[in-house]
Amino acid sequence: MENQTLLNVPVVGRRKEAVARVILKAGSGIITVNGIPMDQYFGRETDRIIIRQPLRATNTLNKYDISANIKGGGISGQAGALRHAISRALLAVEPELKDILKKGGFLTRDPRAKERKKYGQKGARKRFQWTKR
């Protein structure tokens, strides 16, 4: 089972405007994002911690090699999308991990997104300054 693809179809994870596609392979825990090692792609330690959360929770940190393709959004949204995709991929490979992933909240897609700007206003909620005279 050395370096064999466990999933033929990439698993998709989303957060804000970012979309991450993940392929799991049996390996030693190497994570590559768009062909670049994860530690180089994500500069902030916080993002790297977020990505490894589902792997730490399920004790599979050094069990799989993860190849990810991410498009759209910013760095933080991409990290959240990658975490979501990794969680879903782990669930597809090992269904018995569902309780752990569900309890950690890793399978839920975070619905928060930017609210649109409204007409007649300065932003989504902020209004133009009111003047009496």
Image: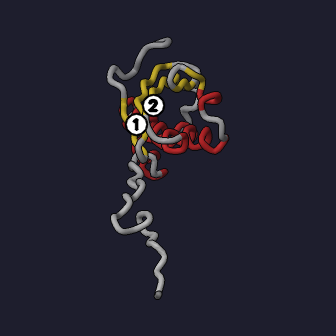
Pointer 2 residue: 70
* Neighbourhood count class around disc 2 (C-alpha, 10 Å): few under 14, some 14–19, many 20 upward: many
| Secondary structure under the numbered disc 2 in the rendered image | strand
Which residue bears the numbered disc 1?
19
Q: Nearer the viewer, residue 95 or 38?
A: 38
From the top left corner, tell me how far across and down residue 75 is, in percent: 54, 40
Residue sitting at 43 percent across and 28 percent down? 22
Q: Does 63 appear above or below 49?
A: above
Residue at x-position 61% and y-position 42%: 49
119 up-or-down from 56: above or below: below
Residue 100 is situated, as x and y percent measured from the top left of the image, at 46, 46
Query: What residue is drawn where x is 46% and y is 41%?
Result: 73
Does the residue at mark 2 contact the one at mark 1 (Cβ under 8 Å)?
Answer: yes
In this image, 29 relative to 94: left or right? right
Between discs 2 and 1, the one toward the N terminus: 1
Name which residue type carries label 1: Val
